[in-house]
Image: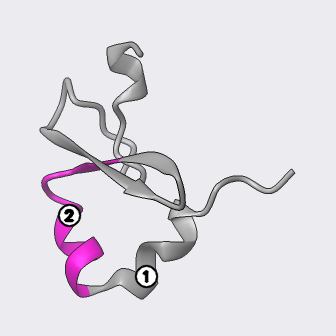
Amino acid sequence: MSNSDHVCFNCQRSEMEIPVLAWRYQGQMVWVCSECMPLLIHKWQQVAEKMQPPKE
């Protein structure tokens, strides 16, 4: 995995711009930055759809 893969699922900023953490959701690795993490904790419904794997 390259650094370019470590991008916040919500704001699309990379780890080169802001600290990111790895989370798992529905069997997939999800990267979230320190600024967007409160959304996952306090406003889950607003971001849950963005975390869904792409439909084929």
In the rendered image, residue 1, in percent from the top left (x then y), is placed at 41, 16
Give the residue at mark 1.
46
In the displayed structure image, the side of residue 5 where residue 37 appears, left or right: left
**How many C-alpha atoms fall within 10 Å of the one at disc 1: few (<14), some, or many (≥20)?**
few
Q: Earlier in the sequence, mark 1 or mark 2?
A: 2
Q: Position of residue 18 (x, y in %)?
A: 14, 37
Q: Identify the residue at horizontal 39%, vertical 20% (top origin).
A: 4
Q: Which kind of residue does numbered mark 1 sit on?
A: Gln
Q: On the image, which quarter does residue 45 sit in?
A: bottom left
Q: Which mark is residue 14?
A: none
- Residue for point 15% across, 58% down: 35
Circle 2 is placed at which residue position? 37
- Residue 6 % position (x, y): 34, 30
Q: Is residue 44 above or below residue 38?
A: below
* Direction right: furthest residue: 56
Q: Position of residue 44 (x, y in %)?
A: 36, 82
As helix, strand or loop, the secondary structure at mark 2 comes to helix
The correct choice, above or below, for 54 with respect to 50 in the image is: above
Which residue range is magenta in the image? 31-42
- 26 lies left or right of 23: right
Residue 22 vertical position relative to residue 49 in the rendered view, above or below = above
Residue under the image location 32 percent in, 17 percent down: 3
